[in-house]
Image (cartoon, rainbow, N blue to C red):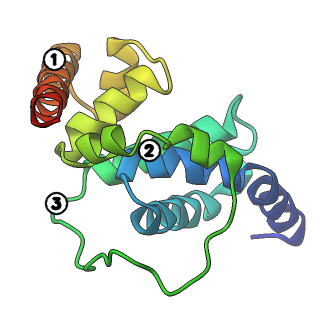
Amino acid sequence: MADSELGRFEEFITHRLPALYRYACVLTGNHHDAEDLVQEALTRVGTHWWRVRHKDDPEGYVRTAMVRILANRRRGLRERLMAHTPDQPVDDAGLDGLISDAAMIAYLAGLPRRMRAVLVLRYVDQLGDAEIAEVLGCSPATVRSQAARGLAKLRTASHMEESHE
C-alpha cells in the first residue's frame, strides 16, 4: 500500500473505529469477539483500501465485511471467555447505551450467528430483506425465515425470564 493510501486508511480507522467496534459488539455479543471481528475486517479491507475508499460508503463496506465474516464462520471460537477480565474498563457512552440491556445482549448472543446477523442488519442497520439477502448471500425468503425464528426465540427467552421473576 502506498504511503498516501496508508495515511488515508489510518485516518479512516482513527475516525470510525469506535463506531465499528460498537457495531461488532452488537453482532458478536461480547467485547473480545468484537475486537477480533473488527481487526479481521479491517485487515481484509486494508489490503484493497485504494478501491474501497472511492466507494460511497467505506464504513458500510467494512460493516458488511464484518457481517459476512461472522455469518460465514464454520466453527465456534476457540477462546474461552472469562467472567472477569484482568484489564481496566474504558468508558464509552455510545457502547454503554447500545448494550445497556444486558438481558437482550445475552438473548442475542444465544442465537446462531446468521440469525443474529439478520436481526442486527434489520434492526440496527435498518436494511430491508433484499438488502440483507445480498449482504449474507441468501434469498429474501431465508432472511424472513431467519428473522421470524430469531424473534420467536427472543420472545420465548424474554417470556421465560419474566415468568422466573
Q: Which of the 4 image quarters holds residue 122?
A: top left
Residue depicted at 24% across the width and 70% down the height: 77
Residue 110, position in %: x, y? 19, 47
Check disc 2 and give the amino acid type.
Answer: Val
Residue 37, position in %: x, y? 45, 61
User: What's the distance in space between the residues labelled 1 and 3, CA to CA?
Assistant: 23 Å
Question: Left or right of 33: which side holds 92?
Answer: right
Mark 1 — residue? 148
Residue 51, position in %: x, y? 68, 47
Mark 3 — residue? 74
Q: Quadrant of the N terminus?
A: bottom right
Q: Secondary structure at mark 2?
A: helix
User: What's the distance in space between the residues labelled 1 and 2, CA to CA?
Assistant: 19 Å
Residue depicted at 33% across the width and 74% down the height: 83
Question: Left or right of 12: which side holds 128?
Answer: left
Q: 45 above or below 54?
A: below
Q: Which mark is residue 49?
A: none
Viewer-nearest of labels 2 and 3?
2
Residue depicted at 19% across the width and 29% down the height: 158
Viewer-nearest of labels 1 and 3?
1
Check disc 1 and give the amino acid type.
Answer: Ala
Q: 139 above or below 82?
A: above
Mark 2 — residue? 26
Front residue of 35/66: it is 35
Check disc 3 and give the amino acid type.
Answer: Arg
Residue depicted at 32% across the width and 78% down the height: 82
Going by the picture, which residue comes out furthest to the bottom?
86
